[in-house]
Amino acid sequence: MSTFPLPGVYLADTLAPRHPGLAAELTTALNQCGARVATLAGTRDIWARDYMPVPTTSGRWVLFRYAPDYLRPKCWQHTITDGAQLLQQLGLPFQASGLVVDGGNVVRYAGKVLMTDKVLRENPTIPRGDLLSQLATALEVDHVDLLPAHPQDFTGHADGLVHLLDERTALVNDCRQREPGYWHHLTTCLQRAGYACIPLPYNPYQNTNYISAVGTYLNFLRVGTGVVVPIYRQVEDEPVLCSLQKLYPHHQILPVEARSIAQQGGVFHCITWTCSPPELVPQARN
């Protein structure tokens, strides 16, 4: 991996030392997609999506305050990366926001933005209406649609719940049998926001702790000509790959073993930061 000016797909420089095999396989897969891969120097953890800026419709970058509640205990504060410092090294102009938002809690496509209601708890002193208005202004959209955070996801991120296939279609975890109440709540919110929902196989139910994301496939990464998909040596792997090939018939579907990193709470969308982001430009799935 090398360092280069924008655009590209960036990985934290903490990733390869901690997960050398995965970093190498992910880089190879991204190169197969036609993406250049570089490192962010001076990071303190691997979750680049969360502390790097979020794109706006006009192409500006907004850097929210990275201070999630799960990192506020003193024992975790040393892991908080200063995104502004990284952006200054890259020479990328940005607009700073005082709102507390993780990048992984922003899912957007063609001018529409989804976030979970975790953002309300992260900014408790701001009335709901004012907060949503400020978020919409910062992200240059008419409004922000809120989804219910999964009750067992300590991060509360939207990118583990939904992937937008286009401006009218959302891919969601198929938890209908095991979590019918949450399924109903989530899909009702998505339908109210104007999305049809397509379930994707999902099975985190064998995990021994609430941190692990093993069995979650929605955190895949679509870049260029390919779709990089986490697999876990589970029976759901093959149905997921087949489903995504049908949804993206002219993309190369590239599976990468992700169990080691998923056990820490996230997968490929979480550990990458993409410039310029494909989700800003409406693209046909076929």
Image (tube, rainbow, N blue to C red):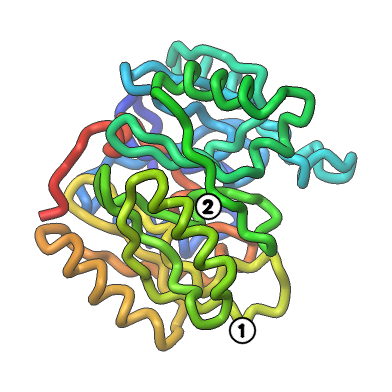
Q: Secondary structure at mark 2?
A: helix
Location of residue 279 by image quarter = top left
Image location of residue 187, percent across then percent down: 45, 59
Image location of residue 4, percent across then percent down: 35, 27
Q: Is residue 164 left or right of residue 185?
A: left
Of the pair 254 and 185, the residue shown nearer to us: 185
Instruction: Name which of mark 2 and mark 1 comes first in the sequence.
Output: 2
**Residue beneath the point at 66% across and 51% down:** 155
Of the pair 45 and 57, the residue shown nearer to us: 57
Q: Is residue 123 left or right of residue 242?
A: right
Give the Cα separation between the discs numbered 2 and 1.
Answer: 27 Å
In the rendered image of this protein, does residue 64 appear above or below residue 237?
above
For the residue marked with disc 2, what is the amino acid? Ala
Residue, disc 2: 16
Q: Secondary structure at mark 1?
A: loop
Q: Quadrant of the N terminus?
A: top left
Q: Residues within 10 Å of mark 2 (few under 14, many from 20)?
A: some
**Residue beneath the point at 82% across and 39% down:** 72
Q: Quadrant of the C terminus?
A: bottom left
Image location of residue 60, percent across then percent down: 39, 16
Q: Is residue 72 left or right of residue 126?
A: right
Location of residue 235 by image quarter = bottom left
Location of residue 130 by image quarter = top right
Residue, disc 1: 206
Of the pair 86 and 61, the residue shown nearer to us: 61
Count the marks: how many?
A: 2
For this orientation, the residue located farthest to the right is 74
**Residue beneath the point at 64% across and 78% down:** 207
